[in-house]
Image: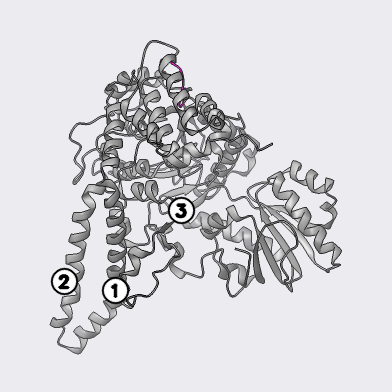
Amino acid sequence: MMHTTASSHLTLPTVRAKMSAHLSYGRVNLNILREAARKELREFLDKCAGSKAIVWDEYLTGPFGLIAQYSLLKEHEVEKMFTLKGGRLPAADVKNIIFFVRPRLELMDIIAENVISEDKMHSPRDFHILFVPRRSMLCEQRLKEQGVLGSLINIDEYILDLIPYDGDLLSMESEGAFRECYLESDQTSLYHTAKGLMTLQALYGTIPQIFGKGECARHVANMMLRMKREFAGSQTQILPVFDSLLLLDRNIDLLTPLATQLTYEGLIDEVYGITNGYVKLPPEKFAAQKKQVEVGKDLPTEPKKMQLNSAEELYAEIRDKNFNAIGAALSKKAKIISAAFEERHNAKTVGEIKQFVSQLPHMQAARSSLANHTSIAELIKDITTSEAFFDNLTVEQEFMTGVDTDKVNTYIEDCIAQKDPLIKILRLVCMQSVCNNGLKQKILDYYKREILQTYGYEHMLTLNNLEKTGLLKPQTSTRNNYPTIRKTLKLWMEDANEQNPNDISYVYSGYAPLSIRLTQVLARPGWRSIEEVLKMLPGPHFEERQQLPAGLHKKRQQGENRTTLVFFLGGVTYAEIAALRFLSQMEDGGTEYIIATTKLINGTSWIKSLMDRPEAP
């Protein structure tokens, strides 16, 4: 994408009135957070008077699209949008050039190059920088060294910490959070988390109880409490919306993201990858839907981009089901839709016809939604019914149930011999290591040697990273705690009911995510009942209470559910989110969950974030 004009912009979603309606359907109205973010953006744009062009750090366009569409920018005189790249800026007849960037040194060098080439042209333009989510002294120093700091009129920060993704889901979209915390001992993302939670409390009231497990969780809680003391005078007089906050470190449960997710949404993410709420799919599957494709005409080559969230009725209904229950759900929906269309034959009076016509747009949208999801389900079914998928899943489930985790696995050996994708191998080897509390040195060395000889010695760095984060490590104690944890928390349920689930284990067809079991036990009967298991997991567990201003104590009505915000530090998978939604919907659950995370992840994107290649000399 070179550059885009106002008429043919490619970056942000176009105007969509209903874009954010689904954010306010849930227990907590997350639209309040989105509106606050939009207000700040407007205020910044108005600081730069006159016509504007925005130069985007490409990574930011996805997250920004969830906050503001192009129409909002246009209202504030944004006429052009470009992607940040070296050299000269494309021609634009505007007064202001605004760089929207993450605080990264390499991006400062590109900005300097852009500004210097403009200065040489003597163009009378004003330059501004908006750092997302924080200003950085180091970046400003770099701009100064490059001699362009003086050319910048406004240097500001746009604090986009928690982005509302759906009616019950917030993400910081901080792609490096896990790596920074566990590999580089860089706690910047934890500071952003604490700040994000303070913003949340300013909008939704102080959260009376904070629970947590893990080093990072302890760190975030400490920062929150310190920030609260610093702002002691300016407390919000808002009745608390959340009853409690649960902070969970990703490294207390390294197993769950490595496993293949088996919910509909989880599998879409495993197979195609969901980015900022969008998925790109092979176009040929959808071309057939449009009858006008003529024989011999070229099939479309651009991937089909689809937005996935609960604003789409059918998707909200099926996203969290186990994939094996999707076929039945879609055919049931198809019957309902065709029955609705059949109603037209029964409409006799003008009033009845009018009634039918008024429902038509909704029915047509439902039919098109059904066609799309039937196509996606068929694409995924081709994969899930393959022998390769079945073999891989069988080995995963053997590891989870503790079968032969202490010896070299022949399936992994075969996959390496066939040169299967490296990430597939790493996911399995790490899973074996996690389920065995580390591998015997001899076995670990054997795997490492096989991987390096087959895939290249440059992957030595990646293997070291996996070891540092505890994903692939030598066994230090002879005792493997995993079986005890599995039995105590009932992490493996034989005969999980995939069609009408009665337990969270349905999201992995038998395995109940450890992170969600901990959440479930905390709500009832409480963590005291599992003290022994908590001690086996890394990091401290704790509980803090935050004083509420007088008169703001919530009086719960008989039968009213508690609302808990669960924050995953280091990433969360769609299958875990599905399990939490399942707990929220349980009749006698008593708790509704809102989910927040540093990043939405799956095993592949997670391992990728830890991979390193040596720099070319």
Q: Position of residue 401 (x, y in %)?
A: 27, 26
- Amino acid carrying label 1: it is Gln
Q: Is residue 244 visible?
A: no
What residue is rendered at 52% in x and 35% in y? Answer: 547
Look at the magenta stretch and give its main secondary structure. loop
Crowding at label 1, few (<14), some or many (≥20) Cα neighbours within 10 Å?
Answer: few
Marks 3 and 1, the one that precedes in the sequence: 3
Query: Which of the 4 image quarters holds residue 572?
Result: top left
Circle 1 is placed at which residue position? 364
The answer to whether 119 appears left or right of 481 in the picture is: right
Marked residue nearer the N-terminal end (3 or 2)? 3
> Helix or strand or loop: what does disc 1 sit on?
helix
Q: Which residue type carries mark 2?
A: Ala
Q: Quadrant of residue 530?
A: top left
- Using the numbered discs, state the Cα–Cα distance from disc 2 to disc 1 in whole angstroms: 13 Å
- Circle nearer the viewer, 3 or 1: 1
Disc 3 and disc 1: Cα gap in Å?
A: 26 Å
| Image position, residue 471 (x, y; %) | 46, 27
Residue displayed at 27% across by 36% down: 391
- The range drawn in magenta is 471-475
- At a point 46% along the width and 21% down the height, the residue shown is 473
Secondary structure found at label 2 = helix
Q: Is residue 389 magenta?
A: no
Task: Using the image, tell me which numbered label, if any, was put on residue 200.
Answer: none
Check disc 3 and report the residue beneath it.
165
When the figure is inspected, residue 431 is found, relative to residue 370, above or below; the finding is above
Q: How far apart are the two marked residues, 3 and 2, measured between alpha carbons?
A: 34 Å
Rendered view: 251 above or below 57 = above
Residue 606 position, x and y percent, is: 47, 38
Does residue 613 appear in the picture of this structure? Answer: yes
> What residue sits right under mark 2 in the picture?
339
Q: Quadrant of the C terminus?
A: top right
